């Protein structure tokens, strides 16, 4: 049976931390679906279509990675695409507490779906989409925090 994992998030923008989690997850799963979800608590900074395009560019040569958009519950989307695992990256103990609560609720709703936590590489622990957005919003150079995609490296607000 193919091991399919869903890596959900807003990815606004997709950072080197996200890229690292996906690359490290490739040895664990046959397919990883990076799923851009709608979060009613977050207003998107970059259009979803652009985020999808950027992520596809980052993984254009990796056939095990797909990109999708979804609304609604993550576990329902997992069922829709046949994913048995949800990948989440953990940077801090606060991330763990937050993600643990979500994982336990997901487990209660869909016992067949496992949450898998991957610790962020130490060099990426301080990188968040929120910080990267602020750098870009204020005209700074965020390229060192973005994957090596030409379009992402040149991302700035003019």
Image: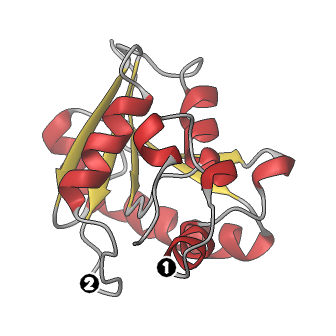
Q: Quadrant of the C terminus?
A: bottom left
Is residue 32 shown above or below 113? above
Residue lying at 16% horizontally and 64% vertically, measured from the top left: 71
Question: Which numbered disc flags the more N-terminal residue, 1 or 2?
Answer: 2
Is residue 79 shown above or below 56? below
Q: Is residue 30 left or right of residue 46?
A: right
Residue 153 x/y as whole percent:
53, 45
Q: Do the residues labelled 1 and 2 touch (CB within 8 Å)?
A: no
- Asked which secondary structure carries label 1, the reply is helix
Residue lying at 23% horizontally and 65% vertically, measured from the top left: 47
Q: Quadrant of the N terminus?
A: top left
- Asked which secondary structure carries label 2, the reply is loop
Q: Nearer the viewer, residue 54 or 41?
A: 54
Is residue 59 shown above or below 97? above
Residue lying at 62% horizontally and 45% vertically, measured from the top left: 16
The residue wearing badge 1 is: 137
Q: Is residue 151 left or right of residue 142?
A: left
Q: Residue 124 carries which label?
A: none
Separation (CA) of disc 1 from disc 2? 21 Å
Q: Which of 60 and 105 is in front in this view?
A: 60
Residue 75 x/y as whole percent:
28, 55
Q: Residue 40 carries which label?
A: 2
Is residue 48 shown above or below 83? below
**Residue at the right extreme, as displayed:** 122
**Residue at the bottom extreme, as displayed:** 41
**Residue at the front extreme, as displayed:** 158
Residue lying at 44% horizontally and 59% vertically, measured from the top left: 13
Q: Nearer the viewer, residue 5 or 156?
A: 156
In the picture, residue 97 is in which quadrant? Answer: bottom right
Label 1 Cα crowd, 10 Å radius (few <14 / some 14-19 / many 20+): few
Looking at the picture, the colour scheme in use is secondary structure
């Amino acid at each position: 049976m193919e091991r399919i994992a869903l890596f959900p998030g807003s990815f606004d923008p997709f950072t080197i931390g996200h890229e690292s989690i996906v690359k490290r997850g490739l040895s664990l799963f046959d397919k990883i679906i990076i799923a851009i979800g709608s979060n009613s608590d977050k207003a998107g900074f970059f259009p979803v279509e652009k985020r999808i395009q950027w992520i596809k560019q980052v993984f254009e040569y990796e056939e095990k990675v797909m990109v999708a958009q979804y609304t609604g519950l993550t576990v329902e989307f997992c069922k829709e695409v046949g994913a048995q695992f949800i990948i989440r990256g953990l940077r801090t103990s606060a991330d763990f507490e937050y993600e643990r609560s979500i994982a336990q609720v997901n487990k209660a709703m869909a016992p067949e779906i496992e949450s898998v936590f991957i610790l962020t590489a130490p060099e990426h622990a301080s990188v968040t989409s929120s910080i990267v957005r602020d750098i870009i919003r204020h005209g700074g150079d965020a390229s060192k925090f973005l994957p090596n995609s030409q379009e992402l490296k040149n991302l700035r607000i003019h």
